[in-house]
Amino acid sequence: MSVTQALLGPMVAAGPPRPLITHYDDATGARVELSRATVANWAAKTANWLVDEFDLEPGAPVSVALPAHWQTLGVLLGSWWCGAHVVDAPKGAEVAFVPGSAVESGAGAHVVAAVGLDAMGGPVRGLPAEVVDYVSDVRVHGDDFAPRTSIPGSAPALLGATVDEVLGTAAARATELGIGSGARVLSTMDWTLPGGVLDGLLAVLSAQGSLVQVSNPDPAKAERRRSDEKTTVELDG
């Protein structure tokens, strides 16, 4: 069973409409909230795209060099759902997911996918011909994903760590960070690989919690955000 099936599956089954991620960007004032079901749809579209367009096989390396963002969540969960091995370097990767503002950072991958990181999911304009726009490409793919093969717990998932190791570490970190079941987590932590993703994302999902992720945090807004979002745990970047 993949990382995504193990973590996201029970959450969707228990309550599809519940919020999974609320993303703030204090530099722009944007706020976007996605339910568990909507995140699952983005992850499914990503997994279908990787398999249908690139014949991605379980264990194939996929590079993800993106900040904490709701689109990054779809990228990561979609990659794991189809059994990809998430790495942090583009060289030799089947697909490198990079910000639309830094497409050159994907050099060395077979395919470079630009992620716009737009609050409303807008595409990246004016890309070089050899770079694909992630949002435009995945939109046409299905909202459900059925893996062609079962992903074993021994399969590589994150920088050489297996699926079972990633899930075990995420559960352990949830306990160590005080993220209890159903916690509402306010975080300014970036999703660096592997530590930031394990603590700032996977530990939250392991506890079936929800995440209030803040980019470019304004300290003056922190207290009101705690109150408005009713957060119970904080993770600092």
Image (spheres, rainbow, N blue to C red):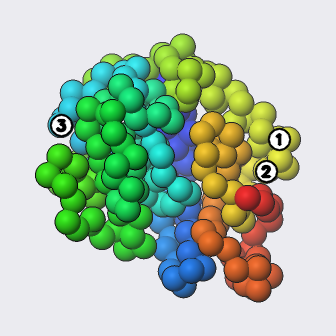
Q: Nearer the viewer, mark 2 or mark 3?
A: 3
Given residues 184 and 137, the one toward you in this image is: 137
- In the rendered image, residue 148, in percent from the top left (x then y), is placed at 28, 23
Dots 2 and 1: beta carbons under 8 Å?
yes
* For residue 157, side relative to residue 54 (left or right): right
Given residues 165 and 217, the one toward you in this image is: 217
- Residue 189's disc is none
User: Neighbour class for label 1 at 10 Å: few (<14), some, many (≥20)?
Assistant: some
| Residue underneath mark 1 | 175
| Residue underneath mark 2 | 179
Q: Of helix, strand and loop, which one carries label 1?
A: helix
Q: Is residue 201 visible?
A: no
Q: Residue at horizontal 57%, vertical 80%?
A: 27
Q: Of helix, strand and loop, which one carries label 3?
A: helix
> Quick check: 162 above or below 195?
above
> Quick check: 160 above or below 146?
above
- Residue 53's disc is 3
